[in-house]
Image (spheres, rainbow, N blue to C red):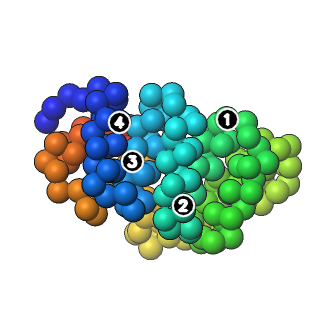
Amino acid sequence: MRSWPPQRGAAGLSQSAASCPTDAQLQINIGVVLEQLQDHFGALERYELALKQQPDFAAALLNRGTLLLRLKRLDEALTNNRRLATRYPDWDAALYNLGETWLANGQWQAALDAYERALTITTTVAARGRRTTPRGRFYFPSCSENREYQDLAEYCWSSGSGNR
């Protein structure tokens, strides 16, 4: 496996995006790499492109909401994370993000309610021996058969950059 600097990763993913302009997963991957490079506005742009292609794409909503919260854009984060939790009411990560947003807005009871719902889901699903959340933040685009891209994706995953 190769060692990839994030700048090269962003360039490689952008080249892949040129051949797959409608691949929402690829837009998310580029957004994750841009976040690593501290290009938060570029990352937001990529998440928004993914949402234009697939308006209810859970990973795009989750990543966008997390980043908006980190940037202290609380009104936008609340709107995004409410949408995520409404669209995916049985997904603990969506409810956790909503709880984090309520907490940042000083709405303690709403935050507690969201956290309790997330915990209930996590506990219930874990008791059944299944996972409730995606494996991480890095997603493999369906149209990418490029070996270099696959090496990059594997590097990002194994180095921890694909994990939340």
Reading the image, the residue beneath label 2 is 51
Element on which disc 2 rests:
helix
Residue 155 appears at what percent x and percent y?
24, 38
Q: Nearer the viewer, mark 2 or mark 3?
A: 2
Crowding near pointer 2: few (<14 within 10 Å), some, many (20+)? Answer: many
Mark number, residue 38: none
Identify the element where label 1 is drawn: loop
**Count of marks overlaid on the render:** 4
Q: Earlier in the sequence, mark 2 or mark 3?
A: 3
Q: Amino acid at mark 3?
A: Asn
What residue did someone put label 3 on?
Answer: 29
Please report contact status of discs 2 and 3: CB closer than 8 Å, yes or no. Answer: no
User: Within the image, what quadrant is residue 13 found in?
Assistant: top left
Provide residue 28's location: percent of width, then percent of height. Answer: 44, 51
How far apart marks 2 and 3 lie (CA) works out to 13 Å
The answer, for residue 45, to whether it is visible in the render is yes
Q: Earlier in the sequence, mark 4 or mark 3?
A: 4
- For the residue marked with disc 2, what is the amino acid? Leu
Quick check: can you spot residue 160? Answer: no
Mark 4 or mark 3, which is nearer to you? 4
Q: Nearer the viewer, residue 111 or 2?
A: 2
> Please, what is the three-letter code of the amino acid marked with disc 4?
Ala
Q: Name the residue beneath numbered marker 1.
A: 71
**Residue topped by disc 4:** 10
The alpha-carbon separation of the residues under discs 1 and 2 comes to 19 Å
Instruction: Kindly report the distance in space between the C-alpha atoms of the residues bearing marks 1 and 4.
Output: 21 Å
Mark 1 or mark 3: whose residue is earlier in sequence: 3
Q: Helix, strand, or loop for circle 4?
A: helix
| Camera-nearest label, 1 or 2 | 2
